[in-house]
Amino acid sequence: MKTKLLYAASLAALLMAAPGARAETVGPVTDALGVVKIGKGQPVVIGGYSSQSGGDTNQGIDELRGSEIAIRDFGGAVLGHPVKLAGEDAQCTAEGGQTAATKLAGNKQVVVVLGPSCSSGARAGAPILWRAGISSVAIGATAPALTAPDRPDGFKGFLRVVPNDLKSAAFTVKYAVEKLGVKNVATIHDGSPYTEQLVRAFEKDFTAKGGTIVASEAISPTDTDLRPVLTRIAAKKPEIIFTPVFTSSVGFLLRQKDEVSGLADTKVIGGEGVFSANVIEAAGPKVVGFRIVAPSTDLFSDKFPAFVKAFTEEYGEAPIGGFSAYGHDAATLALTAIKAVGKSDDEGNLYIGRQALHEALMATKDLPGLTGALTCDANGDCGAATYAIWEFNSDDQSSFAPGTNPKRIFP
Amino acid sequence: MSETARSATEPGVFAEWLRRSTWVDFILLAIRIGVAALVLVGLAGGLAAGTYSAADFVSFTMFGLTIGSIYALIALGYTMVYGILRMINFAHGDVMMVGSFAGLFAAGGLNDAGVLGAFPLLALPLVLAAGMAAGALVSIAIERIAYRPFLHVRSLAPLICAIGMSFILQYAARGLFGTRNRAYPGFGWMEGTVSFAGLTIPIPQVVAFVAALIVLAGLLAVVRLTRLGKAMRAVAEDRDAAALVGIDVTAVIVATFAIGGAMAGVAGVLYALVFKQITVFMGFFLGVKGFAAAILGGIGNLGGALLGGLVLGLAEALGPALILEGYHLPAPYQLKDVIGYGMLVMILIFRPQGLLGERLAAKRA
Amino acid sequence: MSFNTVTSSFKVTRRRRSPLMEAVRLGLIAGAALVAFALIGAYSAMDKRAVIEGTVTLSQLASLLIVFAAGHVAARDARSGTSAALLNAVVAGLVAGACLSVLVWLIMAVNLRTTLVAASPALAKALSLGARIASLEALAQLPLIGAASALVGALVGRLPAGAGKAALTGLAAVITAGLFRDVFASMLERLPDLTGPDHEVFGSAGLNPGAAVALFFLAAAFALVRDRLALKRGGVPRSGLSRPGLVLLIAGVVLLPLVTNDFVAQVAMLVALYMLMGMGLNIELGLAGLVDLGFVAFFAVGAYTVALLCSSGPLAIADVSFWVALPVAIVLAAVAGMIFGLPVLRVRGDYLAMATLGLGEIIRVLVLSDALSPYLGGSQGIIEIDHPRLFGWELKSPVALYYLALVLAGVVAFVSLRLQNAKIGRAWLAMREDEDVAQALGIDPVASKLLAYTIGAAFAGAAGAVFAALIGSVYPHSFQLLVSINVLAILVIGGLGSLPGVLVGAIVLIGLPELLREFGEFRYLFYGIALVAMMHVRAEGLWPAAYAKEGVHAS
């Protein structure tokens, strides 16, 4: 009994001490973080983690579906190997991100990971992946701290294609101050880290530029009757309302706004989370005149309708929110980098060095993505990061096409 | 209760109370005083702050009554089943969602067939009928799967099964119908508004409120006047005795579930008409609120369900404005659930049987 | 008054049909299940995952199993000879397969997608199994495959008991190995000399065909040998879990994370956390009979206490060691339990369930709110919580933290056991059975309920403390109503009032779904189905408490 215990304890010590990633040489490739060997005909496994269950299901499913479409657009294969997306559920919680990341990190065949959807999951998950030598390309985690220059070492392997909150907030403030010339603004967030952070960034910028936040309100994503909170906002007489909340809430907000006296002329500016045809259905006729802050390039306008069409054919429904395009871009970024660093030997085996892959990802420059030309900076921010204000002008769902409905009105 | 009645007639009421009370009573008293003080200070502060005009308060009341009538409709179905079975149907909110979707598809079908255009007045009853039928069917299925096998067992199995059914309904609907938000059609005449006491009220909200009253009246009529109602009351009173006198207990329970499910269908369709968009996940939280409303009113009591729903709706709409405004908290409407649930807890402390619940309920529960 | 009497009573009420009709009915049920499986999108999603490389995907396997089960039941229900039984099974299989054929045809002939989003041409393609989509060949092969699968199911049922069991064991082994490929592959990685490179047994997604066949026969042979041995020793094949079963289970719990990978340790860690909470609720519900749907509130109190005391972030009020913060968290959670318990404990039954649910939601909303965000971080949570240190060693890896949680769970289990057998434990049981009688016997209901509530809250607080240390950050979104529901379900599934039941319940409801995390989209659907199914199979729980078992046998 005693020896067994001793054995178990030493085994435990051994296992706990074992490092996740270490330098190795496999086939023709030597890499500081390890090498993934993919046998002839075997698939290149790309991990994914996003919110597949719980309150943010729509966003997470949209994202990984976007990635799958990207893999298909890439020809379904890289360097002669089929590509397989191993998607995991990270919910939108820290423990979900941690568990999913641990699972992906445990699979030695995972080359790179796409996701997650939420900053909380990224905070817990990205360091675990990086400890195993795996870079991750986030799709929806927008917290500025994740790519701050002074971020902890665990986030060195973390990249994201979605621009961080500071950029879109700064742009929105610019629009409000320079174009609209408004002084009094109300904000609404829904208690999710994303919307709260974005609203706070906006408030900070806007106040710094001399504006006044007359009301800073919050709702819950499950609220259906927003008229009381709108009444409170109406009492403060804002000129515009900035609210990056998601589709359901935007639907209720727009439909109920006119029932509250004093808000009929107040414009609402939403976030990119509702950049989809579904918001037209959710808000009905009231969507006309609704403006959102969302990525803008001509690239986007050209490619996006084809993407939505492919998506709809594959899944039977169009993207629910605006994040599927980032899923597409994350996959494109990852596949391009794999293509650049993968080395095949004569037997048809493929070798990918993890450090080399990370460097290739970070070196991405002017890669044409769906949301714009992707260029990664030294901190892992790869978002195309040019924004525009789009305005919906028709309540016909089938008319959804960036450029016509919604129409770009600024810049 | 008899103690207080007696002590009130005797001299030295306070001394008597003091003698009879335990430490728990003192702490409860302290909690009551504390809560009352919090509310009063908030109220005074809120009124003094003067954020809102009188017209705003009228609006708040109307908003509260609207969402309250939806809660009431859900609570009526809840309470109906509970009254007979003394079991919580956790999946009730999801039955409501199914009813709502059935109504949506029926409306789509009717529209394609040209019925909506030709007879706009017929639309509402037809869509309601579809919602009620779907709700009743799902509810019967729930009874068969989650309740009947455990009818004679004292355990939490039905509760767990009902929670399981709730997940199944939500996620099956998600897989079948997709996650997107669906716009609910209006039927021409329902798009308008009516003017009342200086307020402009959209017609669906009036319809929802009236429907809650009609449903209550209808259910009361069923329970009080029909043979089925008599059998229901007998089963509620004593299931074994009812069986002994020749009542088909199973059939009565199935009928109760069907009626409860149909009411959930009504709630689902009216909810959708008022709020104009539905998703497959909307049922759960509305169900919890309906459950809270049913408890608030005194579960098993039909009138109580209506009252509970309206009170809960009013608390959510008015509470933050009246009470939290005085404390100058940021984003008071984020805390509306604190007010709603807090009031529920308080009422349960002051009146453990709910607003209109009989004493009996506490005994049986 | 037990579960058995009830099930038997409705078996009697079932109308007798002719065996053939019964077979058709079974086939239709299986067909409906198959169609539902396809239309909720699960078929397409699981088709991407191979169980046996290049041979069978998960969705094909699931479909085959449904028909297999239908054939099995159809053959068993027959009151005639073997050939008639096999015929019934074939009929059931044909009908079930035909249902899918109809679906495939409908998808291609009518556009169902405006209502049913999963009814895509891709689904029809997947269901056509390589034949031209919805061609006659594609439509005809489905009933045939169904009939074959049902026939196999019937044959397995008709085999001599030992052989049938062996076949099922083999099948189960193959399915388990294929499903949990990652776990087993990681175990094989640890033992490189025994089996060679892991991809010989496992492909990138599932078992390799050769390995699958070998595994099937190995497991079947094992089952045969075990049965032989058991017969030789004159013992009856054991039913249910016994003392050796418990020892095995505990040994597995202690050693599993060591022989697999970090992911299993991480999952085991979550299981241990839920065990801690489950044991807390077990005191409230299992012993004292208090239905609590707001249990997550105390979990949150524990987690936030540790977060505030051990964080190096901006919101920290102190930066002390985890070992100092842990007792503080437990005490604070207990105090919160007492404060909450006092007012609501006079409320009974379902009223109590609602009151506690309300309290749980109040805590979550408050923690999330902007009003308290200067102190608790609002939706941004509290980050940079330090990992616990032990003798200068940072407990950081999932394995280390798992053992931390396990030790804590052991302590809590010990305390629970002592409480259960102490005077207060019997007072709780008495009160659970009949509160009025208990009061008449001199038990102070409010005080003893309050004690149960406080102790339960303290256990949940401990779980929350470890949770914060494990994740390194806490967010309000981790404290949803769903956690309370999960804990309640663990208790009921495991068996109310039973400590081993908590362990089994946590493994089944938390551990197994985690291992199938990649099907997150359908996770709660399967969770719901599992809840309902388990309640139907064993309403008293998987490992009922001793007194509950006695109650069943006595009646």
Image: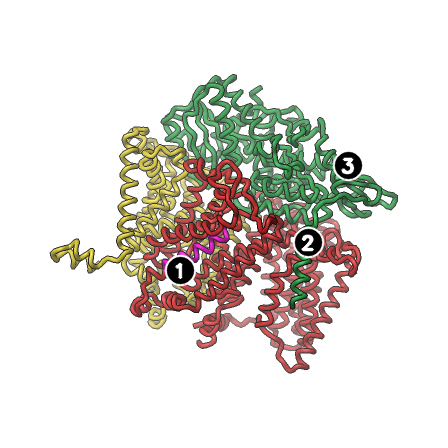
Q: Supply the letter of whichever chain is yellow.
A: B
> Label 2 marks which chain's residue?
A
Q: Amino acid at mark 1?
A: Ala
Calculate the distance from the C-alpha at mark 2 to the C-alpha at mark 3: 34 Å
Chain C, colour shown = red
Q: Which residue is mark 1?
A: C452
Disc number at residue A15?
A: 2
Q: Amino acid at mark 2?
A: Leu
Q: Which residue is mark 3?
A: A339
Residue C485 appears left or right of A400: left
Residue B30 appears left or right of C146: left
Q: Is residue C539 visible?
A: no
Q: Name the mark nearer the viewer: 2 or 1.
A: 2
Instruction: Say which residue appears at 56% left-offset and 25% top-offset.
Output: A390
Q: Supply the letter of whichever chain is green.
A: A
User: The C terminus of chain B is located in which quarter?
Assistant: bottom left
Element at label 1: helix
Q: Main secondary structure of the magenta part?
A: helix
